[in-house]
Amino acid sequence: MSRLRSAVLLVSTLVCAAAAAEDMPHQLTGELIRTEHENCKTSTGYGMRFVTLRDVDGDGRKDVVLDYAEASCGGQPEPYCDGSGCLLKVYLGGGGAHRKVFEGRVRSWKVEEHGGRPTLLVDGRPLTR
């Protein structure tokens, strides 16, 4: 039974990683790998909501939010999450490229409409660039 459970866990991890990789702009793959190597001495798994592609600044272009609350190192949330929150990275899209505008530990984030424009709120405050 434990072999079956291990196989199911491996397949679901690979499916989640493949889904995240499909959504991940190719330009950001190198930084994703660097973050893994700097933080995790074993394998990193990604949940389905690790990558969010949507306009977060109201310019009509797809931006990228990487939510490390949806990542685990060897099955554990540490080192991506600790008592201060979880690692979050935000990249704004433009001109065929993405520019990192935020990296830090946060407790929460969401996108809300303000004045008809999407606004990224990090720990309840609008993200300033």
Image (cartoon, helix red, strand yellow):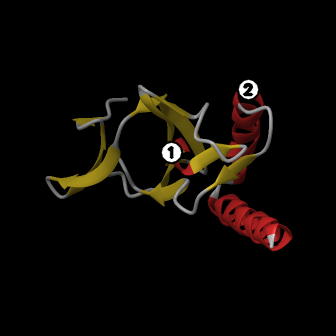
Residue 123 in the image: state x and y as whole percent: 29, 35
Q: Residue at left 71%, top 59%?
A: 17
Q: Residues within 10 Å of mark 2 (few under 14, many from 20)?
A: few
Q: Residue at left 37%, top 29%?
A: 129
Q: Is residue 35 left or right of residue 59?
A: right
Residue 55 in the image: state x and y as whole percent: 40, 55
Q: Residue at left 67%, top 47%?
A: 75
Picture quadrant where residue 79 is located: top right
69 versus 14 height, above or below: above
Q: Secondary structure at mark 1?
A: helix
Q: Earlier in the sequence, mark 2 or mark 1?
A: 2
Q: Residues within 10 Å of mark 1 (few under 14, many from 20)?
A: many
Q: What residue is disc 1 on?
A: 69
Out of 72 and 91, give the one closest to the viewer.
72
Out of 18 and 3, give the one closest to the viewer.
3
Q: Secondary structure at mark 2?
A: helix
Residue 78 in the image: state x and y as whole percent: 60, 34
> Which three-letter amino acid code belongs to the residue tagged 2?
Glu
> Which three-letter amino acid code belongs to the residue tagged 1?
Ala
8 versus 81 height, above or below: below
Q: What residue is disc 2 on?
A: 38
